[in-house]
Amino acid sequence: MKKQERKQQKNINLINRNFMKQMRKVLGAVIIVSAVCFMGDVTAEANTDMETLNIETVNQQDTGNIFLTKISSTKKGIKIKWTTSKKYQGYMIYRSKNGGKLQRVDIISKKQYVDEDIETGESYRYQITPFYYKKNKKVYDKKSSISQSYIAKPYGVDNVCVVTFKDHKYVSWEINEMASGYKILRKSDKEDWKEIVTLNKNIDRYEDYDIVLDEKYQYKVAAIENVDGQDYSSVYSASTNVGDLKGIDVSYHNGKIDWKKVRKAGISFAMIRIGYGTSKGGIVDSSLDYNYKNARKNGIKVGFYLYSYADNVKEARNEAKFTYRMLQKYNKLDFPMAFDFENTYRNKKKYKKSNTKIITTYCDYLEKKGFDTSVYSYMDFFHKAVDYKKVSKYGIWLARWTNSTKNFYDGRIPNVQMWQYSAKGKINGIKTAVDLNLNVAH
């Protein structure tokens, strides 16, 4: 029996040795695979970082030195901020969406980050890992704690501008393609912020007539986005007052103008040619109706000018009558009706008296009809061929091309209200060169 037992034990030991050999082979393969996988991870890490530095991780039991301080919404996304107790050279941003796994989204050097790749109504959490370099190795310090969940709001709106008209405020903004609508808040000197209107999508303007003319107003606009039946509002974007400083003057020669683009280019007023004079009256500018309606539609203040060919008082009066008829239809003006008198052949001293009489005849006719007027010409013409002291009472629109808004000079001509400083302007929305003006009356 003992001999048989020893034989069985020997067989068992043999089986065990064979089993251990097989296990060592398996474990060896596992170790090799694990090493390959680990190196693959390191390689992927290096490729993602766009660098070839070796990576070293500090013991995660070290005391943390980074603390999230704020999460908020901006017009462009979710903003996170943090503070640190030591100096770092960069930060890895990790993000979790709707309770999912934390994933790296960016590497930055500042202590704040705006996450623009968000979806309205989704829940996000963030974690920051700081790092520094030591002997050409990127060393990661202990991560921050994971932030609380934050619900993403819609992207906001840009370029909220206000133009003041005689009877209303014109509020405009950039279209937000994702918006389902917009909310507008208003504040005055005597009234705190309150919501005044909610608008549907694809609207980029609001005309506020419910105002007191002498009060000052501010506006804020937020985008609304509807997700699965629920409305989310963006942060509010504050308005800026455009005023009426920068302007253009145009006619059919400038082609079909995209007035929406002109408004976004910062143009706040336009002097539009109503037509040009003839011995019997005048001819309507073929782009008058289009320019007038679309300029006003896009919140641009409007004035008119008539290019005169008058050679005597009778023709000047006929041009004035023609202008008056036109002003019965196009009567909402923000600037005086300008008499454009500049023909080169009349720029002679011998015409000074008759030129002055032509101008006063035209302007006096319209002034008696209740319209304010002004006179346009260039400096040499005013000095040589007009008694500018007599016509300046109407207001002067002076052409003096410097191609710059600097070094304004009125040439000692009284009551210059508008300055045409360039004939070579380039404005988005106008394919041709265009005259540029400044309202210098303010």
Image (cartoon, rainbow, N blue to C red):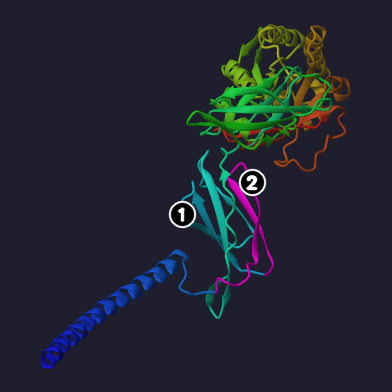
Is residue 193 or residue 122 the one in the foreground? 122
Q: How many marks?
A: 2
Amino acid type at circle 1 is: Lys
Indicate the quadrant where residue 323 lies: top right
Q: Residue 307: percent from the left, percent from the top?
A: 68, 19
Is residue 300 placed above or below 93 in the rendered structure? Answer: above
Q: Specify start and end residues of the magenta stretch as a single range.
A: 59-86
Q: Residue 34: percent from the left, percent from the top?
A: 34, 73
Indicate the quadrant where residue 360 lies: top right
Residue 305 lies in the magenta-colored region: no
Residue 72 lies in the magenta-colored region: yes
Q: Mark 2 points at which residue?
A: 72
Is residue 280 placed above or below 68 in the rendered structure? Answer: above
Q: Residue furthest bottom?
A: 3
Is residue 434 or residue 357 the one in the foreground? 434
Q: Residue 97: percent from the left, percent from the top?
A: 49, 48
Amino acid type at circle 2 is: Ser
Q: Name the residue under label 1.
A: 101
Left or right: residue 373 versus residue 121 is right
What distance separates the C-alpha of mark 1 from that of mark 2?
22 Å
* Quadrant occupied by the C terminus: top right
Task: Label 1: state its secondary structure.
Answer: loop
Q: Comparing marks 1 and 2, which lies closer to the viewer?
A: 1
Q: Which of marks 1 and 2 is nearer the N terminus?
A: 2
Residue at 63% in and 30% down? 263
Task: Label 2: state its secondary structure.
Answer: strand
* Quadrant occupied by the N terminus: bottom left
**Mark 2 surroundings within 10 Å by alpha-carbon count, few (fewer than 14), some (14 through 19), many (20 or more):** some
Q: Residue 29: percent from the left, percent from the top?
A: 27, 77
